[in-house]
Structure formats: structure tokens, C-alpha cells
């Protein structure tokens, strides 16, 4: 049935285009902002090893499953699940899994855009020399002033959303593909320039030892669960992005080989980000375990007090914007594709509608740092509540049920047909990982974030 299906949105022009797009979806703020600071908080090298194992055993099997489901259904995640459940003779309730992913991506983009707006603001601040010679207190005040200003945040939030929707409105090949063909090479060039600079700081080997010389005495149960969770989230799984990108994948492309390349490149970007950041932090006597403030509060201190710091600060925050944009276009694409399919409206109109709703919801995140800072849900402001709901509940649930559907509900002959692996042994290994190992690991992460395993907290 699905063999003859063609996506009404078009296809990637080649496997390379899909690799760029899916890597762009995976590579984002999580790689360049989150990975370095959680590595710093969890002791370095040993954490990196555990993270790599989790990518191989959890992330790749689920990513293969999600891509396979997308290509089989050839539609938005919601409609893809409807197609696949009919093929498998399964309950129609499975289409709610598609809704879970689309809504998660929509919610994530609403606050992701605000954070990306901060990166845009910091591009300007770096260019104008705002970090030059500033003390830690002054840099901290600079960030606080940005958060306390609704007008400045709304401006940058709007600029980022308009840029994102302008790309998505142009379609698969005309918008998404053209954008990632520019963004991804640009991202790598900027990252390598920063790595090259890190090699001149005098603390390069200290940074390398921190990242790649394991000391397992620093590892706790919480560290393992953090690595497991981040390996899953960094590949953009469970939010519909990889499924919808998979629906644009040509039939003759090997899913397994392509996903392994994407996961490898995504991991490489995260490692390069650490290689670039940690020597700069060590060379300036700063704290590697400074948490989420590492990018917006700790690094600007270093950029402001080193030779040529304004240039490298500028390059770094441009890199951050590139990474955010490549992920943002994938976050909104599932919702736009669903609107086009179900309401038969022009893609540009669907983009305007979804973009405006996302922008409007993003105002909640903007105001959660200032005007509405006293307004909380379950002890967190609007931003904190959205981040917790999506990253800690919706995405693990999405990944868990994708693994269950691909491993236990989808007909095996259809899985074999889509994956077209070289031999049955490789298929059996994937099937075992996606049926047992991946869902069990994601379920453990899910229980942990709900506080079931207090011993790991």
C-alpha cells in the first residue's frame, strides 16, 4: 500500500539532502548549549562515554524506527499513524501518538524561539563589544537586563519566528533543503574556527583531558540517567520532526545507514562544541560546571577578556543562531504539513497560521521572566512548565510509544521492506533493541523525571 504513496509536499532531492536536513533538526541548542554544561556538571570523560553508549543503544534504534514509519506513511505524523494502523489492523487510537509529537514540537518551538532570540541579541552584543573588559557581575547584569525586558525579547523572538516561517513556507526543496545546504556547512565552518582558536589558548590539553580521560568515580546514577535522556532528546526524537522528514525520503535510500551517519554527525557536533568551549573556560579560570548559564553568562566573560574576543564571541553566537534555526524549521514542519493535508490550504497560509500561534504562545515564555514571573504552574514559571512538560514527559512518552509501535504493532514484512537491511541478523539486532532495550531505557528515564527513583536524584 505505502509503496505507491508519494508525499504531496515533495521529496528530498538526494540522500545527502536528507542527511543535512535531519542532522540540522538534531543539531541545535542541545548540542552547543546543553551538552557542554551537562558534561561539565557530570565530570567530563566518563559521562561522554556513557552518553555515546546511549546514543548507540537507544537513540539510533528509535531514530531508525521513526524514519521508517515516516517513509512508510508519506504524510504528517498524525496522518502517517492513521495509515500505518490501518495497514497493521491496529487500534485507531494510535493516531494520538502523531498528535503527541506534533503538539510537542509546537510547544517546544514557542520557547525555543525565545532562547534563540537571546542568541540573536548576543550576536549584536558581541559585535558592538558589549563583553569587552566586563566583570562577571556586569555580564550577569547584561543577561538579566535582557530577560527583564519584554520589548527586547519580543523583538528578537519575532525576528527568529519570521525567519523560520520564511524558510518553511518555501517547501521541502525550495525552503528546507536550500536552508540546510547553507546552514549546516556554515555551522561546521564556524565550529571548526572556534576549535582552532581553542587550540591556541594554552588550556587545550586540559580541555581534552577533561572530555576524554574518564574518571568513573564522578559518575552517579543521576549522571547515567542524564546521559540517557540527553542521547534521546538530542536526536529530535518523539516530536514528529524526524517522522515528517522521513516521509520526504526517496524510496531507494537506506534508512539504517543514513540514520547512523546522522547520529554520528550530531554526536560529532556536540563533542566539537565541548572541545571548543572547555579550553576557553579553563584558560580563563572559569567554572565548567556552571550549568545553563555557561553560554550566556560564563563564556561572555572569557570573550570579553581575551585577545580578539569580540570576533570569536561573534562567531560563537552566530553558530548558536544557525544551530537553532536548523532545528526550528523541523519543529514547525509537522504542524504545517498536517494543516496542508487536512485543510487543503496553501503552504504559505498554513505557515502564517502556525507561525502566528507559535509566536503568540511564545509570549508566555517572554513574560515568564518579567511581567508574569510570579505566575507559576506546579512551582515553575511558564517557561519552566513548558520545558518540563515537553522535554521530561511528552518526548519520553513519544519515543517510548514509537519504539513499541515499530517493534510490536507495525507488520514485520513492512519493516523489513522499508529497512531493506543486508541480512536478517542485522534486522534481528535492530528489532531486539527497539522492542526491549530502547523502550525499557526510555521508561526508566520517564520514571526518574517523575521522581520514582528518588535515590538517583
Image (cartoon, rainbow, N blue to C red):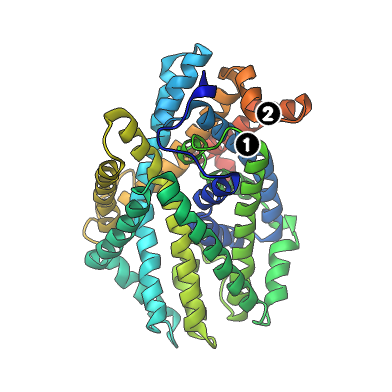
In contact (CB < 8 Å): disc 2 and disc 1 = yes
Is residue 450 in view? no
- Nearer the observer, 22 or 420: 420
Q: Is residue 299 above or below residue 426?
A: below
Query: Which residue has dot 1 on it?
Result: 255
Dot 1, how many residues are within 10 Å of its Cα: few (below 14), some (14-19), or many (20+)? many
Residue 182 % position (x, y):
49, 61
Residue 51 % position (x, y):
65, 50
- Splitting the image into 4 quarters, where does residue 411 fall? top right
What residue is shown at x 59% (from left), y 44% (from top)?
A: 15
Kindly state the secondary structure of the residue where label 1 is placed: helix
Kindly state the secondary structure of the residue where label 2 is placed: loop
Residue 107 % position (x, y):
35, 44
337 vs 455, left or right, is left
Query: Which residue has dot 2 on it?
Result: 420
Mark 2 or mark 1: which comes first in sequence?
1
Q: CA distance from mark 2 to mark 1?
A: 8 Å
- Nearer the observer, 43 or 280: 280
Dot 2, how many residues are within 10 Å of its Cα: few (below 14), some (14-19), or many (20+)? some
Amino acid at each position: 500500500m505505502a509503496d505507491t504513496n508519494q508525499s504531496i509536499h515533495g521529496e528530498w532531492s538526494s540522500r545527502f539532502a536528507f542527511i543535512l536536513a535531519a542532522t540540522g533538526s538534531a543539531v541545535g541548542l542541545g548540542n552547543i548549549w546543553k551538552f557542554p554544561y551537562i558534561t561539565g556538571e557530570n565530570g567530563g570523560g566518563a559521562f561522554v562515554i556513557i552518553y555515546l553508549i546511549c546514543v548507540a543503544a537507544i537513540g539510533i534504534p528509535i531514530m531508525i524506527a521513526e524514519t521508517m514509519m515516516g517513509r512508510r506513511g508519506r504524510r504528517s505524523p498524525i496522518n502517517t499513524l492513521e495509515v500505518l494502523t490501518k495497514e497493521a489492523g491496529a487500534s485507531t487510537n494510535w493516531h494520538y501518538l502523531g498528535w503527541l509529537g506534533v503538539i510537542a514540537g509546537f510547544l517546544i518551538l514557542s520557547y525555543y524561539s525565545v532562547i534563540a532570540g537571546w542568541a540573536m541579541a548576543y550576536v549584536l552584543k558581541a559585535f558592538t563589544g558589549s563583553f569587552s573588559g566586563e566583570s562577571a557581575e556586569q555580564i550577569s547584569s547584561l543577561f538579566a537586563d535582557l530577560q527583564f525586558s519584554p520589548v527586547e525579547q519580543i523583538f528578537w523572538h519575532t525576528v527568529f519566528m519570521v525567519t523560520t516561517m520564511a524558510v518553511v513556507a518555501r517547501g521541502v526543496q525550495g525552503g528546507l533543503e536550500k536552508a540546510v545546504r547553507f546552514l549546516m556547512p556554515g555551522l561546521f565552518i564556524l565550529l571548526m574556527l572556534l576549535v582552532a582558536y581553542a587550540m591556541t589558548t594554552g588550556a587545550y590539553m586540559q580541555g581534552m583531558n577533561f572530555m576524554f580521560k574518564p574518571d568513573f568515580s564522578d559518575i552517579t546514577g543521576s549522571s547515567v540517567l542524564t546521559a540517557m535522556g540527553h542521547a534521546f532528546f538530542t536526536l529530535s526524537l518523539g516530536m514528529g520532526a524526524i517522522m515528517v522528514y522521513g516521509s520526504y525520503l526517496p524510496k531507494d535510500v537506506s534508512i539504517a545507514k543514513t540514520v547512523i551517519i546522522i547520529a554520528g554527525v550530531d554526536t560529532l557536533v556536540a563533542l566539537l562544541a565541548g572541545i571548543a568551549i572547555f579550553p576557553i573556560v579553563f584558560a580563563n579560570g572559569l567554572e565548567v560546571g556552571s550549568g545553563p548559564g555557561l553560554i550566556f553568562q560564563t563564556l561572555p566573560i572569557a570573550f570579553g577578556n581575551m585577545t580578539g574576543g569580540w570576533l570569536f564571541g561573534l562567531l560563537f553566537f552566530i553558530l548558536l543562531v544557525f544551530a537553532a534555526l536548523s532545528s526550528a524549521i523541523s519543529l514547525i514542519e509537522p504542524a504545517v504539513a498536517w494543516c496542508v493535508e487536512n485543510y487543503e490550504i496553501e503552504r504559505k497560509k498554513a505557515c502564517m497560521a502556525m507561525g502566528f500561534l507559535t509566536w503568540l504562545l511564545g509570549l508566555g515564555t517572554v513574560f515568564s521572566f518579567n511581567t508574569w514571573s510570579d505566575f507559576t504552574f506546579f512551582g515553575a514559571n511558564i517557561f519552566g512548565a513548558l520545558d518540563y512538560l515537553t522535554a521530561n514527559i511528552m518526548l519520553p512518552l513519544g519515543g517510548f510509544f514509537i519504539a513499541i509501535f515499530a517493534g510490536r504493532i507495525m507488520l514485520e514484512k513492512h519493516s523489513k521492506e522499508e529497512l531493506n537491511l543486508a541480512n536478517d541478523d542485522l534486522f534481528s539486532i535492530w528489532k531486539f533493541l527497539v522492542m526491549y532495550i530502547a523502550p525499557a531505557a526510555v521508561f526508566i528515564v520517564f520514571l526518574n523525571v517523575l521522581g520514582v527513583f528518588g535515590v538517583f536524584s
